[in-house]
Image (cartoon, helix red, strand yellow):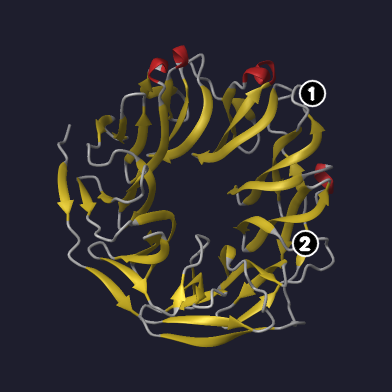
Amino acid sequence: MNMKKYLKFTVAGIFLIAINISYTTLSVYAQPDISEKVRTVDTSQATYVEDFKSPFTYNGKLHFVGTSGEITEATGKPQSFIYQYDGKNVTNLKIRPGDAYESEVQTPIILKDELIFGGILIPDLLKNHVKRIRYDGEFIQEIPDSRYNYPSGFEYPVVCNNKLYYVATGQYLNIDIFEYDGSSTKSIFSKSYYQDPIIYNLIVLDNFLYFNVKTNTTNQIYEYNGIDTKLSKLGDKIKSIGKSVKYNNSLIISDEESNSNLFYVNNNSISEIEVNFPEFKAYLETNIIYNGDLYFLGSIDSEYKIFEYNGKILKVLENNNFSINDADVNFTIQSGALYFKGGTNDKNSTILKYDGKNITATEFVNLSDYKSGFDETINLNGNTYFQGKNKNQLNLYKFDGSNILKVENNKTGFLGEYNTPFVNNGKLYINGFYKNIDGIKHYKLFEVY
């Protein structure tokens, strides 16, 4: 086992960047001439389908988890299935052999051209016995577990070195990490049920698998080398993985308990990034790489800030004329500039632009009640699509770097609120809100064209 070098990395300098701020106006047309609209995807071939969850591309086609109109007798809830959309029709793949599976679809992932997901066997439905199911585009079958007669679960699945790793309940109710190579399954790590173990945060970096293990006495990070199958503790510096982001072939990790410490991890060393900001917290789940540097959301004394890290120096973008009002920053890159949601001194929300030197606060025409900002962002064909609010009405907008245009709902019933934006074959799909029944919101698949 190779000994790791533990290096303490002291930030050479922590700077507040004084940034000039200026204002520009992005045009929003009250009645824009828009070529793009929203249309309802035809689901008649699937009889009935709601929701658009866990979208992924498989064999070049859009797949997603949706809810059918069929009710599970044991639970009284609608069944979920994997659906396929080929650009014309939506098909319920009925991913279950005959009636062997109650299709509680969990976490689809692709390994060696096969689709693998968790599903619940009908005889074990009340026990929530989750099995692994694979689909090769034609046939569906349960993955045999050979020696392991009771792995139940399919949590945190990741692919590393062409092998699938996931967390499940193993023999004797122990919690295990299982490895599946396409033909057989084995446990690579196990913790006793009596230790109240929790295994989570499976992260892949190059040929290494990192994961967090909590028991009733310890909290430890492990590293697993998938090539020579070496397992080792990562050390005592990082007690538990909070959030992480891949940057420059390494991991930037925050500690879970406080988010106040940052670590730089690669295959040979662990470096602690020393931060001297008062009451500093890092929210690495909100991040982006721009011009080779890492930008992420954090806070100083409970005030949100945008931080920049170039691998050596940590900086905070600071200016008295703008602020970060909440955690919904939603970074995006457009026309060579970094955009994110922020606000001005009067606390009005707007989109802020950073070109690497200056920040520009943008104001919107005809959006005097613009408050919800820059949400559910996704880039496609040089444009950024996002969810914004105008006069308390949520809408889908398109930003091309110069103008912001409202995307027409085309009388589809789409009510402007959406989630799960996903691009497949150059087209944008969203899970759109279209009706409210007894206080319950209903969503279905829409296509932007």
Label number found at residue 73: 1
**Residue 335 visible in the current orientation:** yes
Of residues 229 and 309, the one nearer the viewer is 309
Q: Residue at x 82, y 45 (%)?
A: 45
Q: Residue at x 75, y 82 (%)?
A: 30
Name which residue type carries label 2: Leu
Direction from residue 424 to residue 262 in the image, left or right = left
Quadrant assignment for the C terminus: bottom right
Q: Is residue 334 above or below residue 416?
A: below
Name which residue type carries label 1: Glu
Secondary element at image label 2 = loop
Direction from residue 344 to residue 230 in the image, left or right = left
Residue located beneath label 2 in the image: 415
**Residue 101 in picture, x, y percent from top left:** 69, 24
CA separation in Å, label 1 and label 2: 32 Å
Secondary element at image label 1 = loop
Of residues 351 and 57, the one nearer the viewer is 351
